[in-house]
Image: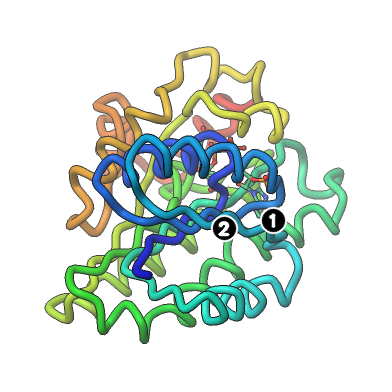
Amino acid sequence: MEAVLITGASAGIGDAFARQLAAEGYNLVLAARRLPALQRLGEELAASFNIEVVALECDLASPDAVSRLIHDLDTRAIRLVGLINNAGFGDRGPFKDLPLPRQMNMIQVNVNALVALTWQVLPQLSTARDAFIINVASTAAFQAGPNMAIYYATKAFVLSFSEALHEELRGQGIRVSALCPGATRTEFAEQANMSGTRLFKAGAMQPGDVVRQALEHRRRAIVVTGWRNRLLIWLGKFSPRLVTRRIAAWLQA
Ligand SMILES: NC(=O)c1ccc[n+]([C@@H]2O[C@H](COP(=O)([O-])OP(=O)(O)OC[C@H]3O[C@@H](n4cnc5c(N)ncnc54)[C@H](OP(=O)(O)O)[C@@H]3O)[C@@H](O)[C@H]2O)c1
């Protein structure tokens, strides 16, 4: 079967991707740690849209998770036509105070797993018609983030990597897009200890709206969701880095 793989599909933006891609008629492979949530979503979407959905439990913080995921796909003879690298998390606090293992896991999930999965599936995507990769970065990718140093750095990596890959694969039938949402109403803020920050108090987008824009503009190298976020990123281009990093620090103090 041909399908789109979505990592982190058990909640938030990944869940919204699953719903909207199901409505487009794609078969889906849903991956995350919470298998029951994936199975519930899969059953609902399979029944509503007459598609096939496979739920795979996987912890992307584990270094062999990607090879096991690829093995699972091979065993089931699933050929990917799309990849949504969405799984990720953040944590707020000074670098020196946050536990090192959690910060290393963040790099593993947000960066290493994303790179490994992309590399592993590129050969099959290159044989598909109109294949696509959407890597979920963030507006955090555009400046340094004091008090979330590692999270911002991982997202800067995702943006830079995706933009370069977009260019490398242009004209080869694979569209690569970096999705850059700002604050979005999901489980992310609570997981990252950010719920009470100015950033989230100022308002957050709904995940369904973020994904609608991502899919509508999936041919673009970079998709920043929401006019307020686009304005902030645009203004950031004319501001010294000292200013943008101080604003980021203030927003998440
Ligand atoms: N919400 C925001 O404000 C915001 C803004 C910009 C960018 N983003 C990015 O958007 C992406 C999705 O986040 P979200 O907002 O939808 O947050 P969320 O509701 O917390 O969802 C995160 C998803 O990632 C999965 N995940 C986390 N750690 C994992 C691991 N070790 N292995 C496998 N899956 C894992 C979670 O599944 P399990 O817990 O079941 O494993 C969950 O499905 C992330 O990359 C995040 O950085 C979010």
Q: Residue furthest left?
A: 171
Residue that carries the numbered disc 2 in the rendered image = 154
Q: Mark 2 falls on what kind of element?
A: helix
- Number of numbered discs: 2
Q: Is residue 150 rendered to the left or right of residue 131?
A: right
Q: Nearer the viewer, residue 106 or 53?
A: 53
Q: Amino acid at mark 2?
A: Thr
Residue 164: image location, x then y, percent: 31, 73
Q: Identify the residue shown where x is 24% and y is 27%.
A: 227
Disc 2 crowd rating (10 Å Cα; few below 14, some 14-19, many 20+) is: many
Q: How is the image coloured?
A: rainbow
Q: Evaluate whether residue 242 shows in this view.
A: no
Disc 1 crowd rating (10 Å Cα; few below 14, some 14-19, many 20+) is: many
Pick whichever of labels 2 and 1 is earlier in the sequence. 1
Q: Nearer the viewer, mark 2 or mark 1?
A: 1
Residue that carries the numbered disc 1 in the rendered image = 106
Q: Nearer the viewer, residue 76 or 114?
A: 76
Contact, mark 2 vs mark 1 (Cβ under 8 Å): yes
Q: Amino acid at mark 1?
A: Met
Residue 160: image location, x then y, percent: 39, 65
Q: Identify the residue shown where x is 68% and y is 62%.
A: 60
What is the CA distance from the residue labelled 2 to the residue labelled 1?
8 Å
Q: Is residue 146 rendered to the left or right of residue 238?
A: right
| Image quadrant where residue 147 sits | top right
Q: Nearer the viewer, residue 145 or 11?
A: 11
Residue 48: image location, x then y, percent: 37, 35
Q: Quadrant of the C terminus?
A: top right
